[in-house]
C-alpha cells in the first residue's frame, strides 16, 4: 500500500493543530492562533507540492 502525503488542520478549543504526513511519518504541531496554523499548513503544502486542500482516503491514513 502506498501512503499519500497530506496536511490537515484539527480545530480544538483555544488551539489549532496542524498534522503533516510525509512518506508515512506523521508530525503534529500546535498553534494558539488560527492565522499561524493556516500559514504553517500552507507552507507545508507548498513544500510537499500538494494542492491547497488534501483529503486522504480512509485506507491511506497512517496506522497509529
Image (cartoon, rainbow, N blue to C red):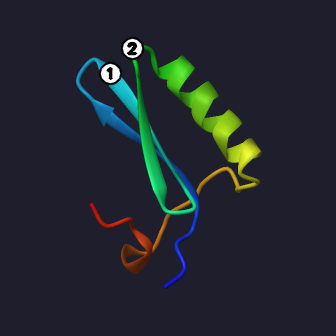
Q: Nearer the viewer, residue 50 or 34?
A: 50
Residue under pointer 2 = 32
In the displayed structure image, the side of residue 63 where residue 27 appears, left or right: right
Residue at disc 2, secondary structure: loop
Mark closest to the chain's N terminus, 1 or 2: 1
Q: Nearer the viewer, residue 19 or 36?
A: 19
Percent from the top left, x then y, of residue 10?
36, 40
Give the residue drawn at x 71%, y 56%: 51
Vertical relation: 41 (above or below) 45: above
Residue under pointer 1 = 15
So how many labels did they put on this image?
2
In the displayed structure image, the side of residue 52 where residue 4 appears, left or right: left
Residue at disc 1, secondary structure: strand
Q: Residues within 10 Å of mark 2 (few under 14, many from 20)?
A: few
Percent from the top left, x then y, of residue 11?
33, 34
In the displayed structure image, the side of residue 63 where residue 19 appears, left or right: right
Give the residue drawn at x 54%, y 80%: 2
Q: Residues within 10 Å of mark 1 (few under 14, many from 20)?
A: few
Query: Looking at the image, do the residues carrying marks 1 and 2 touch, with CB atoms under 8 Å apart?
Result: yes
Residues at marks 1 and 2, CA–CA distance in whole angstroms: 5 Å
Amino acid at each position: 500500500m502506498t501512503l499519500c502525503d497530506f496536511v490537515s488542520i484539527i480545530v480544538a478549543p483555544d488551539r489549532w493543530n496542524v498534522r503533516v504526513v510525509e512518506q508515512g511519518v506523521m508530525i503534529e504541531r500546535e498553534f494558539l492562533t488560527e492565522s499561524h496554523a493556516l500559514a504553517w499548513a500552507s507552507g507545508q503544502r507548498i513544500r510537499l507540492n500538494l494542492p491547497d486542500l488534501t483529503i486522504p482516503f480512509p485506507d491511506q491514513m497512517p496506522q497509529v
